[in-house]
Amino acid sequence: MVIDVEACKGCDLCIDACPPRVLEMTVHEVNTRGYRYPRLLAGCTGCQACAQICPDFVFQVYKYDTPLELPLEDQGQQ
Amino acid sequence: MSDERIYLSTDSPPQEPAALVDDFTPSLITQANHHLCPGCGEPIAIRAAMEAIEELELAHSTITVFGIGCYTAFAHNLDVEVVQALHGRAPSVATGIKRMLPDGFVMTVQGDGDMVNEGLQEVLHAAARGENITCLLLNNGVFGETGGQMTTTTTLGQRTKTSIEGRDPHQHGHPILLSDLAATMDGAAYVARCAVNNAGNVARTKRYITRAYESQMAGAGFSLVEILTMCPTGWFVDTLEGPEYLQDTLAPVHNIGELKAP
Amino acid sequence: MSDRALLEGSEAIARAAVAAGCRFFTGYPMTPFTELLEHMAALLPEVDGVCMNAESELEAVGMAWGAATTGHLAATGSTGQGLSLMQESLSEITNARLPLVVFNMARGQGDYFQATRGGGHGDYRHIVLAPMDVPEAVELTGLAFELANQWRTPVMVLGDYYLAHTYQAVSVPSIKGAAPEVPDWALNGSSGGSGSAKIISPLGGGVEGEEGFDLGAHYAACAAHIQEMSAGVDPLIDIGFCDDADLVVAAYGSVGKFVRYACLRLRDAGHRVGYVRPITLWPFPSEAVHEAVAGAAKVAVYEQNMGQMVDDVRLATLGAVPVEFIGSPSWDHSGFGIGPDINVPDISERILEALS
C-alpha cells in the first residue's frame, strides 16, 4: 500500500471501510494542509475497499505475489 | 497507546514482488487533486463511473455531458471527451450528441438540484423518448455547491438551510423519487438506485453503472443510475457520520436497488 | 444546380438550410416559426439528417447545442417567447464557441433588442441577419451557416410572420449538396484515453495541474473573440437614393421592404427621400449609415415597435444629423406579428410628415 498523505483531507471514510480494520488515523500528525491522515497496520489483505471509498484518491494498492509473513510483534495491538 | 503501534511503511511501493491492483485514480481520471470537501461522495461515484468505462473499453467513444454542481470540477479532470452543459440541461444536450453520433457512448453526470429540480422535464422527456443515453444522478438531497439548501429530493424531516426545522410536507412539499418516476416510463430500459456510503455499496454502484452502460451499448434505450452520495458539509454532520446519515435519512426514502432491468 | 420555384418562405429557408449543410434541426411549434420546423422534418431525412420535435424550447436549444458539439451544422429557432426561453443556452453556447444557426421568426418588430444585444445573461453578442423577403432569406441562410462555422458562434436569422408565410418565386440550391467537413475541434469520443481528451465548455479550459477552470481568462478570451467578430464580419446594408436626399428613412426586415417601396414611389412623385436598410443588425453597418445620411437634413427611423433600432441609428450618426422616430407598434388581434400599419400609404404619410 502507498498512501498519498498529502492528498488526504482526513474524512475517516477509509477507517470504517477497511474490513480487517488495519487503517488508523493519526492523532497529532497532520499533512501540510493540516489534515490528519491514515496509517497502515499489519494485516492488510489488499481488498481495495479503502481505495474505492476514498474521495481523494489517496490509496495505491499492491498485492504481494506471495503473502507476506510478518513477525507477531508487527501485528499491532489488535 | 497508539505510540506502541507499529505502522507499515506506506510512502513508496513495496520492495517485494507485488502487482498493482488499484492505482490512486483510474486511468481516466487525470487529475487526482480536487477541491471537493472531505468526505464527499461524488468523487467516489465518478471513480466508479470511470472505472466502468475503462473496463468496458468505451473510453474512445465516450462523450460525457456535465451539469452544474460540485462535481462540475471533474469536467476538466477526466480523460474522456466532455461537454459542459447548463444546470438541468444535460439530457437534451446528450440527446443532440447521441442523435448525431448513434455509435458513440453518451452519458450525463448531474446532481439532484440539476436533474430533479432544474431539469426534471429534461430527464423525464429523455426517458420517455427512450433516448439511448445513460444519465447518472448524484443525489445527496441538498444543494451542496451553494451550501446545504433544500432540493426536491430532500427527505421529510431533513434539516437544511432552507428547511431549518426539517422538511415539513405542509410547507415544503414532498420529495420527488426520481428513479421511481423514470422507471414508469416505457422508454426507460434500465433504472437503478444505489449509494456510495460503504465499500459494498460502492461495488454495487459500479455493477449497476456497468449494467446501464451495457444497456446503452445494446441500444436498449434510456438508462439511469441514481447514486446516493454523502454531503457532510451540506448536511452539517461530521465526515465520519456521513455514511450513516445517508443510510438513516436518504436511503429509507430513496430505496436502493434495481427498479427496472431487462 | 438550382431550381426556381414558388415557395413559402419557411420552405425556401428550410431548403436553403439543408443545402448549406444543416444536418440537425430541432424546435418547438410556435406561430410563425412552426412551418420551418415542419419543412425541416420533411427534408432532413432525405440527407440522413435529424429533425426533432422537441418537448420545449429549453430542450430544443439544448439538443442543438449537443448536435453542434459533434461538428455537424445544427440549427434551431422559435419566436418571441420561445426565443426568450432559449436565451440562457444561447448565451452559454456563445461562450462555448459553438456554431449554431437560430431562426427567429419574430412576432412583429419588438424583439430587435433581444436579437441584437445578446438576449441572455453575460457580455456577448451574436451575428444577426435580417432578410426583407424570401429570396434574400435564402441567400442569408446560406451565409448564416458559413458565418457560424467560420466564427464558431451562434448566428441569428431574424425574420417574421410575413417572411415565414409569404410565397415567392425563388431559386434554391439543391439540398443534395455535400455538407462541410467536420472540423478538428468537434467531439466524437475518439480523443478519450489519449491523456488529453477534448472538452467543450462555456466555462473555458482547465488550469494546468489543478482541478476546475479559469473563468476570468475564458471570459476575457470570449470578449476578444466578440471584438474580433465585430470588426471582421462584413456589415451588409441596402442603400437607395441617399446621394441627394433631404430625408433618409431607416428600416429593417419585411418592414424595410415596404419602406423601400414607399421611398421609390415618393421619389417618383418628386420628393427627395432616400433609405437605408441594415441587413446585418449585428454588427450594425454604422459606417455605411453614417456616410449615407451625411448629406441629409434628417433621418427618420420606421420600426413597428416603440423605437429600438433607432438607438443604433443614433449611435451611427453620432449627432451629425437629427434622428426622428416615425414608427409605432402595430399588432392585429392575433399577436402573431401581423402589423396592420404595414401599408405603403400609411408609411408614405409618415415619411412626408417627417420631410415637412
Image (tube, rainbow, N blue to C red):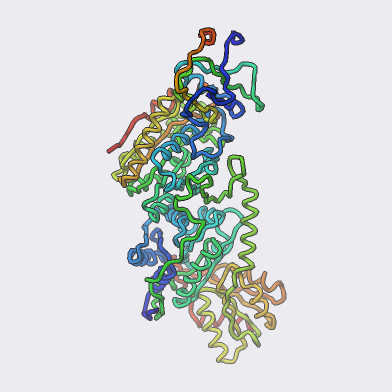
**Count of numbered circles on the image:** 0
Q: Position of residue C98 (x, y in %)?
A: 52, 58
Residue lying farthest to the left in this orientation: B262
Assign the C terminus of chain B to one quadrant of the image.
top left
Looking at the image, which residue is at 53% across and 47% down? C196
Whether residue B191 is situated above or below residue B20 in the rendered picture: below
Q: Position of residue A76 (x, y in %)?
A: 54, 10
Between B130 and B29, the one nearer to me in the picture = B29
Looking at the image, which residue is at 33% across and 63% down? C45
Between C101 and B20, the one nearer to me in the picture = B20
Q: Is residue C164 visible?
A: no
Q: Position of residue A68 (x, y in %)?
A: 48, 17
Looking at the image, which residue is at 51% across and 61% down? C99
Q: Is residue B254 visible?
A: yes
Assign the N terminus of chain B to one quadrant of the image.
top right
Residue lying farthest to the right in this orientation: C320
